[in-house]
Image (cartoon, rainbow, N blue to C red):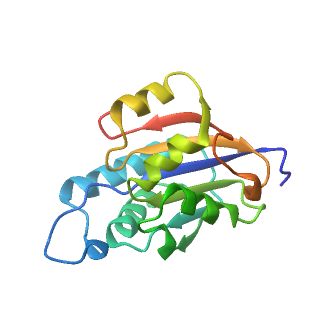
């Protein structure tokens, strides 16, 4: 894969979590979250993006979100469960994405707010259509995702370099 070809990053916030008496890291999905995760998976599958790599937080709610979403995909990408995503800042998430091998063209990152929303806002130097306005108006609710594109190596990914191509949230 040439670094001149556009790369896509999908920033996917975990679906709605429940609040049982467990640590935050171990919180499972709520019933609505299970439904929304599958719907988001169908929307991602409909996008026809062939993901090479999925990076998923080790938190229970992100792993459950990913399991339900990827079930809708025609092909499962390589998945790496990465503890650094949990509670990561946008800068820490950029540093993690900078480690992505250049043979990966399309990457999906399943994580948490405020890091995921902050990363989408920081990376998007521009937006197509009304994607930016919709993301700004809706915020980044549970199970939302943003699709961004940039050209270059993963090591070159930095704030403002990407274009926000699409944004989706369960109530869209």
Q: Position of residue 1 (x, y in %)?
A: 83, 55
Residue 14 place in picture, x, y as percent: 37, 57
Going 25% across and 71% down the picture, which residue do you hit?
27
Residue 92: x %, y % from top left: 55, 63
In the image, 102: left or right of 63? Answer: right
Asked whether residue 6 is in view, the answer is yes
Q: Most extreme residue toward the top, as rendered?
A: 129
**Res 115 quadrant in image:** bottom left
- Quadrant in which the C terminus is drawn: top left
Whole-percent x, y for residue 140 in the image = 37, 43
Examine the image and state in which quarter residue 6 appears: top right
Which residue: 78% across, 61% down? 102
Q: With respect to residue 139, does 30 lie above or below?
A: below
Q: Quadrant of residue 113?
A: bottom left
Can residue 75 be seen at all in this image of the molecule?
no
Q: Is residue 131 above or below residue 151?
A: above
**Residue occupying image coordinates x 61% and y 65%:** 96
153, above or below 147, in the image: below
139 shown above or below 61: above
């Amino acid at each position: 894969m040439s670094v001149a070809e556009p790369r896509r990053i999908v920033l996917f916030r975990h679906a709605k979590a429940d609040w049982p008496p467990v640590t935050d890291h171990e919180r499972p999905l709520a019933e609505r979250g299970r439904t929304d995760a599958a719907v988001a998976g169908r929307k991602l599958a409909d996008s026809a993006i062939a993901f090479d790599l999925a990076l998923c937080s080790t938190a229970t709610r992100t792993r459950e979100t990913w399991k339900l979403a990827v079930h809708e995909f025609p092909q499962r990408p390589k998945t790496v469960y990465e503890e650094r995503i949990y509670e990561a800042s946008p800068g820490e998430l950029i540093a993690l994405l900078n480690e992505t091998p250049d043979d990966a063209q399309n990457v999906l990152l399943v994580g948490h707010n405020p890091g995921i929303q902050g990363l989408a806002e920081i990376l998007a130097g521009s937006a197509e259509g009304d994607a930016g306005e919709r993301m700004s108006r809706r915020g980044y609710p549970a199970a939302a995702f943003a699709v961004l594109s940039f050209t270059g190596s993963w090591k070159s990914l930095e704030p403002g370099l990407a274009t926000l191509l699409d944004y989706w949230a369960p109530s869209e």
